[in-house]
Image: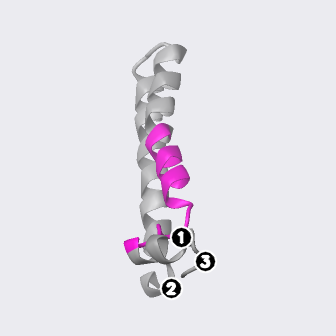
Amino acid sequence: MLKNISRSWVIGSSWCTTLAIIIAISVAIGASPSTSVLLLVMGVAPAIVMALIGGNGPSQTVAEILHSVDAKDGRR
């Protein structure tokens, strides 16, 4: 069964489950709502940053950058 699930799906679901448990524990021990929201934001922020950074394709190599520049005299 685990062969059909991607690695990122397992990591993401375990991340969300852990975050939900931490928020539930903070509510259960009587933490203020602002503390629970802060924990939620601190837990979600790394995932958002990873999505923003990892969403792009692979970066260009040095060879791709150098070959994409046109010379001033028309040479390539």
Which structural element holds mark 3? Answer: loop
* Picture coordinates of residue 40, whole percent (x, y): 50, 32
Choose between 4 and 24: the one closer to the eye: 4
In the rendered structure, which amino acid carries the disc numbered 3? Gly
Q: Which residue is mark 2?
A: 4
Classify the position of the C terminus by image quarter.
bottom right
Q: Which residue is mark 3?
A: 74
Say which label, 1 or 3, has the lower sequence index. Answer: 1
Up the image or down, 52 lies above or below 44; here it is below
Up the image or down, 32 lies above or below 55; here it is above
Q: Which residue is mark 1?
A: 69
Say which label, 3 or 2, has the lower sequence index. Answer: 2
**Is residue 22 covered in magenta?**
no
* Picture coordinates of residue 1, whole percent (x, y): 47, 85
Calculate the distance from the C-alpha at mark 1 to the C-alpha at mark 3.
Answer: 10 Å
Instruction: Give the residue at x 49% y 59%.
Output: 54
Q: Main secondary structure of the magenta part?
A: helix
Choose between 11 and 65: the one closer to the eye: 65
Depth check, mark 2 against mark 1: the one in front is: 1
In the rendered structure, which amino acid carries the disc numbered 2? Asn
Depth check, mark 1 against mark 3: the one in front is: 3
Which portion, as a residue range, is magenta? 45-62
